[in-house]
Amino acid sequence: MLSAPKLIILADSNINQSAHAKKNYPYCIVGNDSLGLFSQRPTLELTFTAENNGVYVQLDSIKVMNRTQGGDTVLYWPDTVLSIYYVGIPEISKGENSFQVFQNYPNPVTDQTTVSLYVPEKDKVSIIVTDILGRMIVKSERVLDKGKHSFRFTPGNSSLYFFIACWQGQSSSIKILQTGFNSGGKSSLEYLWSEDSSPQVKAMQAIQSFSFTPGDELLFIGYANGLESGMLDSPEESTTYTFQFATNIPCPGTPTVEYEGQVYNTIQVFSQCWLKENLNVGTMIPGSPNQSNNGTIEKYCYNNAPDSCTKYGGLYQWDEMMQYTTQQGARGICPPGWHVPTDEEWKVLEGAVDSQYGIGNILWDSWGYRGYDAGTNLKTTSGWYANFNGADLFGFSGLPGGYRYYGVGFFDYVGIYGGWWTSTEGSGNGVWGRDLSYDFPEVGRSDYYGWHKTFGFSVRCLRDF
């Protein structure tokens, strides 16, 4: 239970009230009462950080795209927190020449963190740090020149701190989260350096064009050192998102998955963790009848040969794969903790592996074969017709497993073509699917002509977010 709110007034004891009045600087009031800026209106606070297989990565910027309504906004480091009002209006950062405190990095903190602030003109800046109970942990006052100034904060034993700075009666505050604990239990604040430059802040036009309603799907794209990493979510509460910049390695912490008597390898493709092999689960049935909702997972093997399932994985009709639900992103026949990827999640994969068109590019929304070399980069390095093999740069190992034709149920195109379902329905009785072809360097996307739910295609599973 929180203690009663405390009121803390920062003022120089050597300057009397009339002196303050002469400069027309109001008192700077902070503390639990002043933290209403975090609670006056319900908000989602989306915090972003990044790593490469456990090693911290400093983000250059973060782009947030609303894939439901449209619109986007960009955060520039060290600003790594986006506050979105539930009514759909995002937090608008102050202008370039305004006094402000930038979100600390890294955040959450495990040991030490850096906090930067911008001072529009030389004057005294008062800083306090309080804990969640409103107790003053650190107090600092110093005259700072115009420009950007950075401090190192070492937290103590609290999991949440409020960093509040005041200048000429203006205040600016941030939250600092801690996941580790200082064994000494003592907090400290150390001045690091200054830069005589205006901060790089969010573009006002981009922010004003961004809107959000609970339930919207957001695409987050993190940029660092010339690379990009993307993830999707429909946030319902304040969340910290960690971009992964490792790729072509087993998924950290989950190198393999054992499921229904088989062991599958995993592959990390930036922020997505995929099964490295096509799913091969269930009981084989002949290619002629449709799969049925009889309590048993059924699969087709190319040309009714069990060895084909061993090599290429099973082929499944959409309803059987989804286990007779139409909820996109459903687990379906995937292992626990995994799901059938959505159309949007495939777009993230395509943008991550293509050398020309990045994540979030409008090109991925189009129909047909799209991109530059995403298909080549996803295909295996052997096994494709006429030696039209792929580069498999990211370890996805897309195979030419062919498909089972609907109706009469014959099989075709093994070695030439590989097709994968998504969990996203399309037009009519179609479903959005993806395909790789021996003679195309791109990836195909369609929701009709071959993507009828009674076709049999391969399945790849994606680990839950």
Image (cartoon, rainbow, N blue to C red):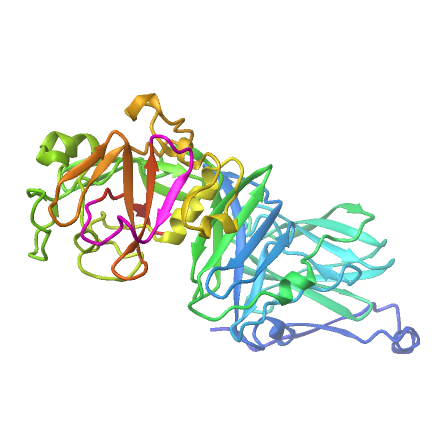
Left or right of 84, for residue 395: left
Residue at 72% of width from left, 52% of height from top?
200
Which corner quadrant of the image does residue 97 belong to? bottom right
Residue at 50% of width from left, 46% of height from top?
359
Number of marks drawn? 0
Which corner quadrant of the image does residue 390 belong to? top left
Give 91 or 422, whichever is nearer the viewer.
Answer: 422
Q: Tell whether position 213 is magenta.
A: no
**Range covered by the magenta-colored residues:** 438-456
x, y (%) of residue 192? Answer: 74, 45
x, y (%) of residue 22? Answer: 93, 76
Instruction: Decide if residue 360 is in sight here.
Output: no
Instruction: Decide if residue 237 is in sight here.
Output: yes
Give the prevailing secondary structure in the magenta stretch. loop
Q: Is residue 236 above or below residue 281?
A: below
Q: Tell whether position 439 is magenta.
A: yes
Left or right of 319, for residue 40: right
Residue at 79% of width from left, 47% of height from top?
194
x, y (%) of residue 352? Answer: 47, 41
Left or right of 13, for residue 316: left
Give 74 or 136, whichever is nearer the viewer.
Answer: 74
Residue at 19% of width from left, 30% of height from top?
311
Give 299 or 76, whichever is nearer the viewer.
Answer: 299
Left or right of 258, for residue 434: right
x, y (%) of residue 157? Answer: 53, 55
Q: Is residue 238 above or below residue 284?
A: below
Give 201 or 436, whichever is nearer the viewer.
Answer: 436
